[in-house]
Image: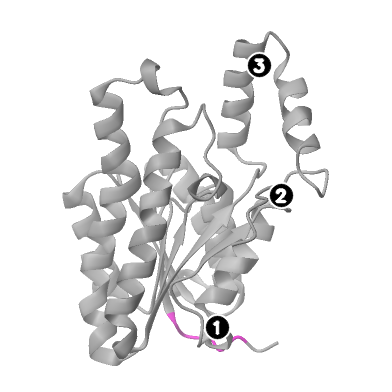
Amino acid sequence: MELGLSGRVAMVAAGSKGIGRAVALGLAEEGCRVSVCARGQEGLDAVRHDLEGLIGPREVLTYRTDVSSANDLDEWFKRTVDKFGTIDILVTNTGGPPAAKFMELTDTQWQSGVESTLLNVVRLCRLVIPTMQEKGWGRIIHVTSLVAKQPLDDLTISSTLRTGLSALTRTLANQVAEHNILVNAVLPGNTLTDRAYHLANVRAKAQGITPEEALKATAAKVPLRRMAEPREIADAVVYLASERASYITGVSLLVDGGVCQSPL
């Protein structure tokens, strides 16, 4: 299937590893020019090497960014526009906030979660929308989590904020649709990333089992009886960024192997 993405400019947040990295590579494979941000320089150098192997050094930008910093996001956006002249696709993506039950969480942890999981999305959308409005074309895709539709007790902050991101997806989609800007969210299920291994360690400690046993228990709850590979999530993001998804907006799409049992 021809996705019509060749030459498009994509910004991918937290794109040095895991799902973000898979998204950046997937977009590059379809011919996008790609700008990636992340906190760690080593990871950025690695993904830059791989991206340049696909599309060449002139089509790649990497920039070290703390997504909870408004100034860092402004600078990443400016550098991307300076290099590529425009923005067509924004993929928002962050690591998860602390894993804990409600009474174990502090105000500081809540505030940090809001900055890194919600406000960064708001800020990035505010930056790219005027450019997309001018050209009458745009794709905004939020990578969130299945907990937006099926909350988990030990992911209190994430469950709360990801649900808010689904509401933002719906309301923002309504407001920018007249400019041919599509806004969607992808809600990954249990995926083999650093976050999954971190949660396995947290749950193993709480349950008195090994991290390997915790991972197996997580996989056993998935109807497909396995966890996802990052590329399986990325494929959904790339499709929503494409011309082929031209009548899909305001959707929070589960890519979870059937974990969430809600019919809606």
When the figure is inspected, residue 14 is found, relative to residue 9, above or below; the finding is: above
Q: Is residue 7 magenta?
A: yes
Q: Which residue is painted at 43% across and 53% down in the image?
A: 93
Mark 1 = which residue?
A: 245
Q: Earlier in the sequence, mark 2 or mark 3?
A: 3
Mark 2 = which residue?
A: 228
Q: Is residue 221 magenta?
A: no
Circle 1 crowding by C-alpha within 10 Å: few under 14, some 14–19, many from 20: some
Q: Which residue is painted at 50% across and 87% down in the image?
A: 246
Circle 3 crowding by C-alpha within 10 Å: few under 14, some 14–19, many from 20: some
Q: Earlier in the sequence, mark 1 or mark 2?
A: 2
When the figure is inspected, residue 9 is found, relative to residue 152, above or below; the finding is: below
Q: Are marks 1 and 3 in contact (CB under 8 Å)?
A: no
Question: Which quarter of the image is occupied by the C terminus?
Answer: bottom right
Q: Which residues are magenta?
A: 3-8
In what element is the residue under mark 2?
A: loop
